[in-house]
Image: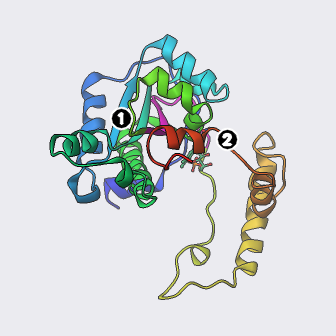
Amino acid sequence: MGVIMKTLLSHRSIRKYQNRPIEKEILDEILKAVQAAPNWVNLQHISVIVVQEQQRRKKFAELCGGQKHIAQAPVFLVFCADFYRTWQACKENGQEFDSVVSQIDNLIVGANEVGIALETAVVAAESFGLGTVPIGDIRLHAFEAIRELNLPKYVVPMLGLCVGYPAEEPGQKPRLPKEAVCFEEKYNSDLTGLLKQYDEQYAVYLRERPWNSRVGDWTGMNADFYRPPYCHYPEVPEMMAQQGFLSQR
Ligand SMILES: Cc1cc2nc3c(=O)[nH]c(=O)nc-3n(C[C@H](O)[C@H](O)[C@H](O)COP(=O)(O)O)c2cc1C
């Protein structure tokens, strides 16, 4: 098996880190890999903010719901969907921009690119023996995150990523059966049996890690997570409007 495949198939998120800095050359390589990733029309709609100062990592740990690993990991990357450079290009060309950037497809473009960039950083980091964990909770206190990062309009913080040398070996989480995720030619919506099969496997996994979840299997965990009135990041709609991605109501 090739080295990249081995890296991909050994992925697991790391939430405990050694007190050891990341070499500058390695961090530079990770960022180079991020910039080399595919992107929409080569318009390059992401930015990465590298947060390394300890006090600031502590601040982000608080902002992200008290996630200690953000303070512990030597590097916290914040991936932003970024249309600021495009705004500048349009301004220089005398073009109106607000009605364009607020079209919903641009959210898809930005989210696509952040996802691609983040996973590229994950794989690059893991190839150097580093560990990572993505942080969606950067959107929990989105307005304060924007202020901390000095983000202008047209830039949205979408995901964080802790990076550092692992101080734990948590093992890999079982995934859904392939047939429930990858389909031949057409979607197969008859998933009950496959989900039941996965529930049994997941129940065993959770029993071995009782601190992981309050609910005993995957469908239970899924339903519990999305229990109405679900609203994981209440600031997001208003923040997206402020940043120009949703038209102001
Ligand atoms: C978009 C996204 C946001 C995430 N946000 C968080 C987070 O805020 N905190 C955290 O501890 N893990 C977070 N994770 C990590 C997931 O919980 C983890 O990837 C998932 O449970 C699968 O586990 P694994 O990565 O070990 O295979 C996030 C993952 C993704 C892809």
Q: Which residue is drawn at 48% across and 28% down?
A: 146
> Image height check: is 189 above or below 153?
below
Which residues, given as a range, are shown in magenta?
156-170
Q: Position of residue 34 (x, y in %)?
A: 30, 43
As drawn, 81 above or below 58:
below
Q: Find residue 119 and name its label.
A: none
Residue at image position (23%, 39%) is 88
- Count of all numbered marks drawn on residues in the image: 2
Q: Is residue 49 left or right of residue 63?
A: left
For this view, does 135 lie left or right of residue 192? left
* Amino acid under disc 1: Val
- Label whose residue precedes the other's in the sequence (2 or 1): 1
Q: Nearer the viewer, residue 127 or 36?
A: 36
**Separation of residues labelled 2 and 1 (CA atoms):** 24 Å
| Residue 74 visible, this orientation | no
SS assignment at label 2: loop
2 and 1 marks in contact (CB < 8 Å): no
Horizontal placement of 153 versus 166: left or right?
Answer: left
Question: Which is more toward the observer, 129 or 73?
Answer: 73
Q: Residue flagged by tag 2: what amino acid is it? A: Pro
- Please name the residue that numbered disc 2 is placed on: 234
| Res 187 seen here | yes
| Image point (70%, 77%), residue name | 194
Ligand 1 placement by image quarter: top right
The percent position of residue 221, horizontal first and vertical second, equals 78, 55
Tell which of 15 and 219 is nearer to you.
219
With 70 as the anchor, is 106 left or right in this view? left
Residue at image mark 1: 48
